[in-house]
């Protein structure tokens, strides 16, 4: 990496660190004002954002249908983006909350566990320009500064959106450097982010498997990983046929290119010849390619044979792997073996089976009679999310403003002459 680029990135980080000091003490009203004004700017500048996005789409040759869909902005998507920013501002302020408090009997200390900002967040993402607004809004409301490194395919869109977010900060008299877009597409910038614990407090990647694997392999900065979405639905022996059809078709085909799309369908052996066969037929008729085991292939000549690799594949397309499993425990075992611990669900009318499934499946989000496509911060009431964390530490599932905070312990005493430790 050349010295000029390093100097530029270090300067951005210095500016971000300075901004965190002002944000840490900003009032709730100030942060809300910044986000409300940013949302208004997104709406007011929709035409210029769409024009920038059109240039990005024209320049992005060779993208898959899923990535092109993620890149594309429409008036409705900009309106949704703006509303998401407003909903973040409508949440309780995540900073300053007392998470727990207690008094220690033997020394009289009063201890409060209090939510505080993490500091400087590095966001590395691909294709989705809406992440620029979502990540900036969430970071800002949680008192963090953020360095955004979007993909080259969405550079113009990201710049137009970031300008609106910075305008919101300026209107609220908060430092605009709390939101900064790294102004280079040089891949060396990603390497610098991954290797700079002095500059960044956490890194969040949001993109394809190649990106997340690189971050996991190279990062010296703590990370919140958003891994692949190999999401499953299991149709249990006690499933309602109407619910199963509605949920399965929505989970797979509403939007095939999102991380919450169902990629694998598991059919209980008890309903495979009846309801299972109907679901396979409906998916095929809706234009979904199916790769199945031998029993599923026997249902319809259009079913392609599945390989072991298919069970672990995130297609992000109108494709789905389908397997027949003997029972509930076999379904749980299949999901825990092949899934990516993102979002997995059961369709059943049996409350005990649902409880067993939710306890047994080791995923960040587990659904009961609901589409996996609800794996989204907006649908969880967060307004927006910075990603779906599939790890087990710090945060899991949709990461909103409350999840982008850490905590500290505040220790007080009522002793008239202070508290000292004896012995």
Image: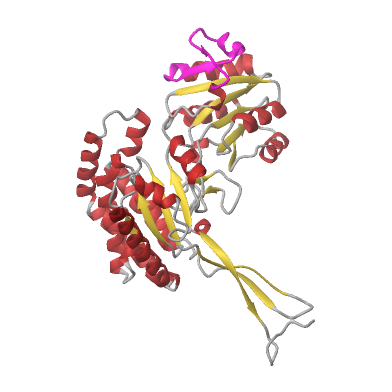
Q: Where in the figure is residue 260, as x and y percent of width and height?
A: 49, 36
Q: Quadrant of residue 44?
A: bottom left
- Seen at 45% across and 52% down, the residue is 195
Q: Is residue 107 magenta?
A: no
Above or below for 7 versus 210: below
Above or below for 157 versus 292: below
- Seen at 55% across and 39% down, the residue is 342
Any part of residue 369 in sight = no
Quadrant placement of the C terminus: bottom right
Q: Where in the figure is residue 8, as x and y percent of width and height?
A: 30, 58
375 left or right, relative to 65: right
- Seen at 56% across and 27% down, the residue is 244
Count every numbered label the image shows and give the total. Answer: 0
Q: Is residue 308 magenta?
A: yes
Instruction: Out of 82 and 361, give the one closest to the viewer.
Output: 361
- Span of residues in magenta: 284-309
């Amino acid at each position: 990496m050349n010295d000029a680029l390093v100097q530029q990135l270090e300067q951005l980080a210095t500016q971000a660190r300075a901004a965190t000091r002002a944000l840490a003490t900003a009032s709730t009203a100030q942060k809300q004002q910044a986000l409300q004004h940013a949302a208004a700017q997104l709406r007011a500048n929709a035409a210029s954002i769409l024009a920038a996005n059109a240039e990005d789409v024209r320049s992005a040759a060779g993208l898959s249908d899923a990535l092109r869909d993620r890149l594309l902005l429409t008036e409705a998507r900009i309106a949704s983006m703006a509303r998401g920013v407003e909903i973040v501002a409508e949440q309780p302020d995540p900073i300053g909350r007392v998470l727990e408090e207690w008094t220690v009997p033997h020394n009289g200390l009063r201890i409060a566990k209090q939510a505080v900002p993490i500091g400087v967040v590095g966001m590395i993402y691909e294709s989705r320009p809406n992440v620029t607004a979502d990540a900036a809004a969430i970071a800002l409301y949680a008192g963090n500064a953020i360095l955004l490194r979007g993909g080259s395919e969405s550079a113009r869109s990201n710049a137009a959106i970031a300008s609106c977010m910075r305008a919101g900060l300026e209107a609220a008299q908060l430092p605009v450097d709390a939101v900064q877009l790294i102004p280079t597409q040089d891949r060396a910038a990603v390497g610098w982010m991954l290797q700079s614990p002095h500059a960044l407090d956490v890194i969040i990647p949001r993109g394809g498997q190649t990106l997340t694997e690189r971050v996991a392999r190279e990062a010296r900065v703590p990370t919140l990983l958003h891994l692949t979405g190999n999401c499953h639905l299991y149709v249990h022996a006690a499933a309602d046929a109407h619910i199963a059809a509605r949920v399965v078709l929505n989970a797979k085909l509403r939007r095939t290119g999102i991380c919450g799309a169902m990629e694998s369908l598991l059919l209980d052996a008890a309903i495979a010849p009846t309801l299972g066969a109907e679901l396979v037929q409906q998916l095929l008729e809706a234009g979904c390619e199916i790769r199945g085991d031998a029993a599923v292939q026997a249902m319809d000549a259009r079913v392609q044979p599945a390989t072991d690799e298919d069970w672990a594949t995130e297609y992000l397309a109108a494709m789905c792997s389908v397997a027949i499993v003997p029972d509930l425990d076999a379904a749980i075992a299949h999901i825990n073996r092949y899934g990516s611990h993102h979002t997995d669900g059961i369709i059943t009318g049996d409350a005990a089976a649902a409880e067993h499934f939710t306890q047994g499946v080791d995923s960040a989000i587990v659904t009961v009679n609901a589409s996996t496509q609800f794996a989204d911060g907006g649908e969880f009431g967060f307004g927006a999310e910075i990603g779906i964390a599939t790890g087990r530490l710090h945060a899991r599932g949709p990461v909103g403003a409350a999840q982008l905070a850490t905590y500290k312990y505040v220790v007080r005493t009522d002793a008239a002459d202070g508290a000292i430790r004896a012995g």
